[in-house]
Image (tube, rainbow, N blue to C red):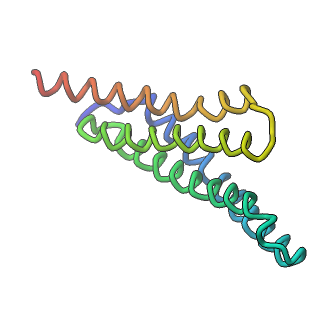
Amino acid sequence: MEKSNGFLKVAGILMIIGGVFSLIIGLLAIIGTSALAATLGAEAAVGLLMVASILGLVSGVVSLIAGIVGTKNANKPEKAMTCIVFGGLTVLLSLLGSVLNVAAGSQFNVVGLITGLIVPALYLVGAFQNKKRAAAAEAA
């Protein structure tokens, strides 16, 4: 049995925790946005809010899946590409969230972007370590 990649495992656990929080917040945001649209009667006015809420929910699902995949496959270098793909998706969704914030009229938040990318970046480092281990195992 391969030695487990602690870096990927810890980042995966953090992504699971973040994914669960994102799921809860995304669901609450969708419910709140729907209630606001029903109250105001102007569904078009809350369109961007609904898109942001759905993006948060999707981001939470992807983070949760990525965390589970990373934790489960931390000792399987041959599964490195799967982890890299999920890590890339989480980075992409984080960047998309920042773009959506700016599109909604907020100022670009560098600190928010960096904090949103820390755990996915650590996850990707662990996934690339596994890829390097897989390549070394093939060469041997």
- The residue lying at 72 percent from left, 32 percent from top is 112
Residue 129 figure quarter: top left
Q: How many marks?
A: 0
Residue 58 figure quarter: bottom right
Left or right relative to 38: residue 26: left
119 or 9: which is nearer to us?
119
Q: Position of residue 33 (x, y in %)?
A: 79, 66
Q: Quadrant of the N terminus?
A: top left
Left or right relative to 55: residue 45: right
Left or right relative to 104: residue 135: left
Q: Residue furthest left?
A: 140
Q: Position of residue 125 (x, y in %)?
A: 43, 26
Residue 40 figure quarter: bottom right
Relative to 26, say whether 36 is above or below. below
Relative to 111, say whether 76 is above or below. below
81 or 93: which is nearer to us?
93
Left or right relative to 6: residue 56: right
41 or 125: which is nearer to us?
41
- The residue lying at 44 percent from left, 31 percent from top is 124
Relative to 96, say whether 52 is above or below. below
Q: Quadrant of the C terminus?
A: top left
- The residue lying at 51 percent from left, 52 percent from top is 62
Q: Position of residue 121 (x, y in %)?
A: 51, 29
Q: Position of residue 90 (x, y in %)?
A: 52, 42
